[in-house]
Image: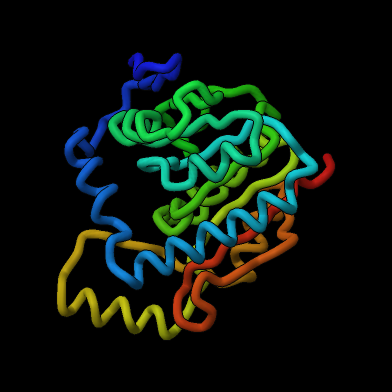
Amino acid sequence: MDLGGGQRARSLGMQDDFTEDGVEEYAKSRYRKADQRYVHWREVNIVRSYLQRAAEYPGLILDIPCGYGRFTPLLLEYGSGVIGSDQSLSMVGYMLKQLPHPHQKQWGVVGDAVKGMPFRAGAFAGVVSIRLFQHLHSPSEREAALAEFARLTRNFVILSYYRRNALHTAQRRVRRWLKPTQTSIDMVTRSEFLDEIHNAGLECISEKAVLKGLHAHHFVLLRKLEV
């Protein structure tokens, strides 16, 4: 799929739950409210701080899932190029078309971290995975994704996960009672998370909460262990 400016999104034959118009509407509405804008600002600043720490490892970055490209401009500031991947071809296509500089080194591919990505081992200086982990509903799925991240990166992984939080769990129960939703997320304890990343050949060198004590969403900077 040629998207102009020399950029391409490659489909691997996966089912796409989004249309182009649906992605555009999602991108416009997702972080529109004041509290959502604050969360977006907070998340961008955490990712920026981790990219600054990982700046000694220049090279290509894999952004999975890239969504509509919320973090793409930031990643392009620090990587020599970015490959955005998502299960939705429409998301990947929208992400590429929104880039401020169409000739930057940016590509897209439809893929699934759990099932494996079409790249050689060590193809990336770093992997960034934001708001994926809480949608993986079994230890085997999470460990498969983590093992794939460890295979693909030479140096670092920036990842977000939902750390078990009693207050956030109660808030979600109330919201689901008031407004039923099909969305389901999994929270894990920190010890469970640390065990899973260690089994994948990674170690945590920093962790930051988006809203400390109030929300389960945490970001971590992981380093690939020496083999």
Q: Relative to residue 185, is residue 65 depicted above or below?
A: above
Q: Is residue 33 left or right of residue 148?
A: left
Q: How many marks?
A: 0
Q: Is residue 43 left or right of residue 201?
A: left
x, y (%) of residue 29?
A: 24, 55
Q: Relative to residue 162, is residue 153 depicted above or below?
A: above
Q: Relative to residue 66, is residue 8 depicted above or below?
A: above
Q: Relative to residue 125, is residue 170 depicted above or below?
A: below
Q: Quadrant of the C terminus?
A: top right
Farthest residue in the right direction? 226
Judging from the image, the colouring scheme is rainbow
Q: Residue at x 74, y 53 (%)?
A: 53
Q: Quadrant of the N terminus?
A: top left
Q: Is residue 119 left or right of residue 9?
A: right
Residue 135, by quadrant, is bottom left
Q: Residue at x 64, y 35 (%)?
A: 79
x, y (%) of residue 5?
A: 42, 17
Q: Is residue 10 left or right of residue 188?
A: left
x, y (%) of residue 156?
A: 70, 45
Residue 95, by quadrant, is top left
Q: Residue at x 35, y 29 (%)?
A: 97
x, y (%) of residue 35?
A: 35, 72
Q: Residue at x 45, y 51 (%)?
A: 132
